[in-house]
């Protein structure tokens, strides 16, 4: 190894207000109260971060549906058996609610012996015809039961799907998605969907546009959750570049004094040595000298140089009885409040979504994960609030692209994916933006700075209680339909995920000097919006596009301001980020949509990357990415032609192929491409 380069991509400092932990008179925390207010909806989608209390929110909603809404049975579906414990009995009445959550032991099928989900179908059938009204099972068990019993068997039932991002609108390859489509088509069941990450991480949407319109969504943001914690003060997300083997670099980022989950790479991954057990052994050796195995927990005992014995849980071991003992020790509720129960967890394909270890201070992941969703879920393992836990971090250890490596293109893709993950998490963690046209007036309870709201200047206000910004933009199109309003209020992060998650697009945005910002902000984002919301009219599609790009670009510009010494050197819930956004908004005399569209939204990411990688590596990255040429498609040409018509309406002439302005030339090229294409078709 020749060295490791650290890129602390995101740093967030929280206010420690304690708001997200406070319960109302019914025992509900803010997120749960928000979800419960919508309990009467037949189709409900709850989007909320890990540790915000989604499981208990579902209990409140299910009990109300069973008592007051004519629902006869509640079936809770979780992606894996270990998450079934989140729905164990709870004395909700102790805190003011009208009933307790009780699951008869025989109906928590996640605890039933054996791994054969098909064999549990008979149990589901018995439950549906019996007197009890709450059942917990895996997604797989529900799929098999649905296939065998048919959609009619679930009439008057509430089907709750935990970790909803496992669903897909691709009915050919995702049976659960197809089954939910049948349930909504029959319209005789209630569905509650819950997720901490609505992005699937692939190109297939979670729901079809038609089905998504049936759901009412409740969103509780990461900012609201983290800023309202009682103990946790600082979160850092970073990717670390290394040369050589990851095992030679890992101890440079692994601090034995931090409670850590290490996710080693899949054996098929480029970073893997292809011997997962030897990798665990090397990590243990790096931590210290082996002292044996705890006979009760199965934890490995390691003594580091400082003399304190570390307890390490090895979840990579394939021996069933050994791994089962370790898993049982980690799940032991009697030790949930004991910080010293375990120090380090080493996992492969485990300890991600639904895994609850509140003491985790560092989630260390080797290599890029399969999707942005997985990254979000892993980060969620480290963002629990716990007494004495003031700092936490996520580290993605990434191999630096080596120009001499024959697999350099794979390395480039992994680098782009790591950057995409950091860009997305910045957006997820940031306060929410409210954009309005200039001089529309102040919004209630927003702080516009020491001078207050000024009708003669651009304004940027902040509401710390709700974690929202208000920024005025000239030329902003406002949404007309209810759906477009809801997309702008709740779903902009999904658009950003699609935008940053396309490697070719991100690569050209970072490294191709000839790529126009408008090709990203107008063409690429416009295409994503049209693909997600094809039924929206063109004006609403444009309004959604403008809001999404403004949110991404302004956050990146604010980050540049706050890291340049003009507003501090880190994100802060109360100072630097807010000051950075205000400074950017107020420094620009006429902040408008056209100006936002002319900003490369990946410019700040490149600035950080250029400080982390040497000149030769950057040059090699540029060569590889620019070689992946992006040719104009018919859809893109049509979009440019529409822009050209708008240009003509505004300026009285069509764009020119020889114009000095690069974006004007691009529009003219689109018109010319369509003309050539039509001529070719006519000539046959």
Image (tube, rainbow, N blue to C red):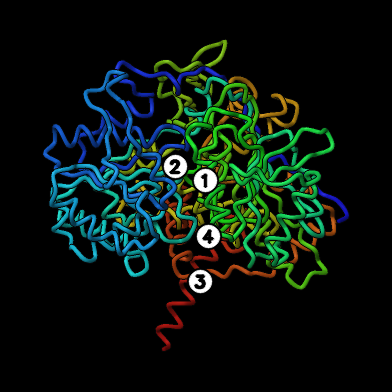
Seen as rendered, the residue at the extreme bottom is 684
Rendered location of residue 488, percent (x, y): 39, 39
**Location of mark 4 (residue):** 667
Q: Marks 4 and 2, how far apart in space?
A: 40 Å
Query: Closer to the observer: label 4 or label 2?
Result: 2
Residue 514 appears left or right of 74: right
Rendered location of residue 597, percent (x, y): 55, 45
Seen as rendered, the residue at the extreme right is 2
Tags 4 and 2 touching, CB below 8 Å: no
**Location of mark 1 (residue):** 377
Q: Earlier in the sequence, mark 3 or mark 2?
A: 2
Tags 4 and 1 touching, CB below 8 Å: no
Tags 2 and 1 touching, CB below 8 Å: yes
Residue 338 lies, with reference to residue 299, above or below; the image says: above
Residue 368 lies, with reference to residue 52, above or below; the image says: below
**Location of mark 3 (residue):** 673
Query: Closer to the observer: label 3 or label 1?
Result: 1
**Kind of element beneath mark 2:** loop
Residue 162 appears left or right of 242: left
Q: Earlier in the sequence, mark 4 or mark 1?
A: 1
Mark 4 is surrounded, within 10 Å at the Cα level, by few (under 14), some (14 to 19) or many (20 or more) other residues, namely many
């Amino acid at each position: 190894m020749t060295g490791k380069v650290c890129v602390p991509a995101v740093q967030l400092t929280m206010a420690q207000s304690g708001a997200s932990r406070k319960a109302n008179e019914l025992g509900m925390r803010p997120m749960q109260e928000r979800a419960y207010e919508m309990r009467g909806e037949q189709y409900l989608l709850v989007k909320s971060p890990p540790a915000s209390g989604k499981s208990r929110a579902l209990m409140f909603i299910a009990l109300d549906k069973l008592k007051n809404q004519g629902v006869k049975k509640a079936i809770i579906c979780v992606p894996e058996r270990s998450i079934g414990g989140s729905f164990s009995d709870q004395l909700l009445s102790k805190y003011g609610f009208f009933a307790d959550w009780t699951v008869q032991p025989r109906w928590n099928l996640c605890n039933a012996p054996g791994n054969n989900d098909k064999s549990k179908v008979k149990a589901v059938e018995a439950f549906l015809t019996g007197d009890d009204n709450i059942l917990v099972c895996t997604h797989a068990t529900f799929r098999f039961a649905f296939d065998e019993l048919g959609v009619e068997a679930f009439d008057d039932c509430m089907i709750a799907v935990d970790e909803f991002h496992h669903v897909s609108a691709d009915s050919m390859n995702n049976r659960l998605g197809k089954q939910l489509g049948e349930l909504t088509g029959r319209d005789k069941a209630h569905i509650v969907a819950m997720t901490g990450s609505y992005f699937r991480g692939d190109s297939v949407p979670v729901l079809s546009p038609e089905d998504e319109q049936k759901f009412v969504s409740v969103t509780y943001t990461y900012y609201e959750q983290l800023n309202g914690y009682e103990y946790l003060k600082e979160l850092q997300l970073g990717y670390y570049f290394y040369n050589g083997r990851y095992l030679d670099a890992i101890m440079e980022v692994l601090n034995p004094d931090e409670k850590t989950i290490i996710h080693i790479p899949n054996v098929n991954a480029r970073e893997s040595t292809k011997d997962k057990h030897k990798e665990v052994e090397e990590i243990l050796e790096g931590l210290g000298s082996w002292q044996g195995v705890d006979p009760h927990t199965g934890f490995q005992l390691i003594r580091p140089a400082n003399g304190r014995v570390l307890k390490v849980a090895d979840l990579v071991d394939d021996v069933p009885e050994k791994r089962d003992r370790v898993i049982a020790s980690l799940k032991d509720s009697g030790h949930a409040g004991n910080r010293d129960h375990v120090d380090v967890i080493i996992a492969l394909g485990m300890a991600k979504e639904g895994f609850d270890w509140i003491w985790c201070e560092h989630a260390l992941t080797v290599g890029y994960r399969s999707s942005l969703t997985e990254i979000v879920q892993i980060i969620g393992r480290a963002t629990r609030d716990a007494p004495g836990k003031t700092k936490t971090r996520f580290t993605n250890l990434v191999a630096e692209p080596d120009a001499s490596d024959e697999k350099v293109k794979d390395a480039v893709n992994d680098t782009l994916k790591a950057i995409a993950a950091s860009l997305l998490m910045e957006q997820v963690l940031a306060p929410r933006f409210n954009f309005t046209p200039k001089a529309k007036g102040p919004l209630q309870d927003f702080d516009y700075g020491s001078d207050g709201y000024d009708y003669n200047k651009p304004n940027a206000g902040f509401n710390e209680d709700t974690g929202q910004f208000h920024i005025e933009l000239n030329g902003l199109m406002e949404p007309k339909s209810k759906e477009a309003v809801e997309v702008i209020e709740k779903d902009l992060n999904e658009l950003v995920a699609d935008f940053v998650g396309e490697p070719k697009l991100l690569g050209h945005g970072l490294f191709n000097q000839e790529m126009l910002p408008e090709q990203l902000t107008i063409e690429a984002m416009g295409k994503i919006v049209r693909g997600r919301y094809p039924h929206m009219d063109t004006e609403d599609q444009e309004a959604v596009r403008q809001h999404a790009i403004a949110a991404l670009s302004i956050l990146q510009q604010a980050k540049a301001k706050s890291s340049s010494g003009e507003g501090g050197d880190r994100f802060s819930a109360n100072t630097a980020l807010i000051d950075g956004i205000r400074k950017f908004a107020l420094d620009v005399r006429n902040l408008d949509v056209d100006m936002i569209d002319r900003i490369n939204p990946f410019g700040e990411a490149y600035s950080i990357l250029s400080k982390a990688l040497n000149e030769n590596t950057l040059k090699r990255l540029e060569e590889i990415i620019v070689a992946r040429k992006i040719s104009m498609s018919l859809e893109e040409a049509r979009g440019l032609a529409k822009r050209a018509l708008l240009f003509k309406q505004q300026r009285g002439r069509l764009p020119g192929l020889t114009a000095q302005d690069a974006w004007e030339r691009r529009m003219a090229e689109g018109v010319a491409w369509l003309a050539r294409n039509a001529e070719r078709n006519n000539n046959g």
